[in-house]
Image: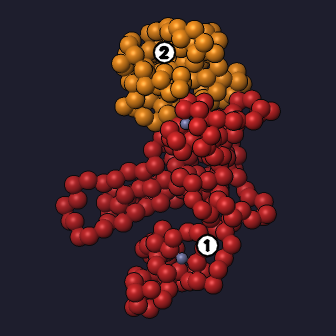
Amino acid sequence: MKVAITSTGNSVQSNLDQRFGRCGFFIIYDTETKGMEFIPNPNKDAQEGAGPASVQLVASRNVQKIISGEFGIKIKSLLDSLKIQMIVFKEPEKTIQEIINMLNS
Amino acid sequence: MVNHCSLFMSPRPLRLRKISNPPIISGFKPYGNRKSEGEPGTVFLQIEEYEALRLCDYNMFNHHQASETMDISRPTLTRIYARARQKIAEALVLGKQIIIEGGKIYFDSEWFSCSSCGCYFNNPEKQEEIKECPLCKSNNFSNYEQTYIEPEESMTRCSDICICPNCGFEQPHRFGCPCKEEICPKCRHNMVRKGTPHSRNF
Ligand SMILES: [Zn+2]
Ligand SMILES: [Zn+2]
Ligand SMILES: [Zn+2]
């Protein structure tokens, strides 16, 4: 199963980005193969529509869950209709490695 | 956020207000008080007031859009919004801390909170039961919306009385809710249990 995690940077030492649509990077983690893909967020500085565009991006990777600090109202209904689970984790200090460890525990 | 109050739900139907997202924080603390004379006190922002503020002032919705989003009438939205702004102003002017809590709300899809890792998550597959926290695998999670049922309608009452030590206002004590967390509806002071040393002035 694939999980998207919003990240401030492009390494496992980076922190969980608290913003969804305007996060630095999306990390697509495969819980079966333990494979990881780092995708720079092209919508980071978009004037508008960063949220829906980011939903499209992660949905194209067939993720089933997204871990981030916050999801806006439009994003929430979009993800609801796509049946992608939202995990709101308000821990800006947590690193991507720590979150992956939690998923693997 | 789970309080005892949620365990005593009345069969009375509740009017629920739609909230799209749980707030990312549980409150604000002031700093640098230049007139520090003891406890400046607390303002309790109901989660529906938070939501009205978020929709109107952060998302820049007009009151019509905001009331539709929350599934309430426009006059109700306007009332909740006015209350929210009044409380924020009070916190700023008097240097009070803000705690976000309470209110009658629900989320679009079912939400849960995990008390092991502190995350919140929804259940996009409503027909499937959630068995564990999707993040830490703990089964120590609870339905998030239930913790926000307004105490007034979810409490059984006992014969104790809460009294305001400031103005003397009395109300029936609500079982499971500490008196000191009750706010006097007249002067907004925190209440105490009647007959205890703190209430001896009355
Ligand atoms: Zn958990
Ligand atoms: Zn009073
Ligand atoms: Zn009481």
- On the image, numbered disc 1 is attached to which residue? B175
Circle 2 marks a residue in which chain? A
* Amino acid type, mark 1: Phe
Do labels 2 and 1 touch, CB within 8 Å? no
What residue is at 53 percent from the left and 80 percent from the top? B162
Chain letter, red:
B
* Residue B6 rendering spot, x and y as whole percentages: 64, 59
Q: Compared to B190, does A103 lie above or below?
A: above
Residue sitting nearer the eye, A48 or B49:
B49
Compared across the picture, whether B23 is left or right of A73 comes to: left
So how many labels did they put on this image?
2
Q: What element carries label 1?
A: loop
Chain represented in orange: A
Residue depicted at x 46% and y 49%: B26
Label 2 residue SS: strand
The answer to which of B137 and B169 lies nearer the viewer is B137
Which residue is identified by label 2?
A26
Does the closest atom of ligand 1 sit within 8 Å of the Cβ of label 2? Answer: no
- Chain at numbered mark 1: B
B24 with respect to B103 (left or right): left
Report the side of B98 relative to A79 (left or right): left
- Residue B102 in sight in this render: yes
Q: How far apart are marks 2 and 1 (CA)?
A: 47 Å
**Residue B202 x, y percent position in the rendering:** 44, 91
Residue B81 is at least partly visible in this image: no
